[in-house]
């Protein structure tokens, strides 16, 4: 299933705690993507050293409303300080529905939706 989101550009200042509130929708129908059967949700962000910060379900990713496709991703100040400072960069959310051989993976790409700024002081 193709997914989409109604997120606008998010700005994070390195060294700050930040909660991202996201609503995932079905790209074809524009209806909320039902997360009720989600067995995994992973949020991936690029660090300055080209490693990847991964936040997982119940460890930085929280389902706010499964039926409405709403999640929150919490980035701690100790994590945001490591993010790559750059405007209009990408991040993505992986959603796994079900488990085992019958599971389905959907990847939601947030193209040019994240700006990370260095602290000025």
Image (cartoon, helix red, strand yellow):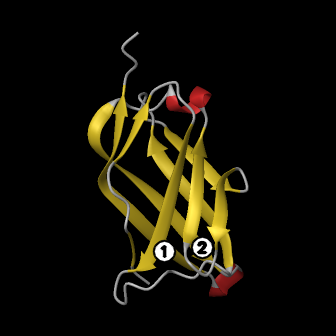
Residues packed near mark 2 inside 10 Å, few (<14), some (14 to 19) or many (20 plus): some
Sooner in the amino-acid sequence: mark 2 or mark 1: 2
Quadrant position of the C terminus in the picture: top left
Q: Residue at x 33, y 56 (%)?
A: 8
Give residue 103's position: percent from left, percent from top.
62, 82
Give residue 102's position: percent from left, percent from top.
64, 87
- In what element is the residue under mark 2? strand
Q: Residue 76 carries which label?
A: none
71 vs 83, left or right, is right
Res 49 → quadrant: top left
Tally of marks: 2
> Which residue matches tag 2?
96
Res 98 → quadrant: bottom right
Marks 2 and 1, Cα distance to the nearest angstrom?
A: 6 Å
57 vs 46, left or right, is right
Give residue 90's position: percent from left, percent from top.
34, 50
Q: Residue at x 49, y 27 (%)?
A: 82
Q: Which residue is drawn at 60% across and 73% down?
A: 96
Give residue 42's position: percent from left, percent from top.
58, 58
Q: Residue 106 carries which label?
A: 1
Say if 49 sits above or below 60 in the image. above
Q: Residue furthest right?
A: 58
Say if 73 sits above or below 3 in the image. above
Q: Residue at x 53, y 54 (%)?
A: 43
56 vs 118, left or right, is right
- In what element is the residue under mark 1? strand
Name the residue nearer the viewer: 12 or 103: 12
Quadrant position of the N terminus in the picture: bottom left
Q: Which residue lies furthest to the top in this view?
A: 121
Residues packed near mark 1 inside 10 Å, few (<14), some (14 to 19) or many (20 plus): some
Res 13 → quadrant: top left
48 vs 98, left or right, is left
């Amino acid at each position: 299933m193709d997914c989409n989101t109604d997120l606008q550009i998010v700005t994070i200042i390195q060294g700050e705690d930040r909660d991202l509130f996201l609503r995932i929708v079905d790209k074809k129908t524009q209806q909320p993507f039902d997360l009720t059967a989600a067995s995994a949700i992973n949020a991936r962000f690029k660090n300055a050293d080209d490693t990847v910060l991964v936040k997982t379900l119940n460890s930085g990713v929280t389902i706010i409303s499964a039926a409405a496709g709403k999640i929150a991703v919490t980035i701690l100040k100790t994590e945001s300080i490591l993010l790559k400072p750059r405007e209009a960069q990408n991040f993505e959310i992986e959603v796994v529905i079900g488990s085992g051989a019958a599971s389905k993976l959907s990847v939601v790409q947030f193209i040019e939706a994240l700006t990370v700024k260095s602290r000025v002081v």
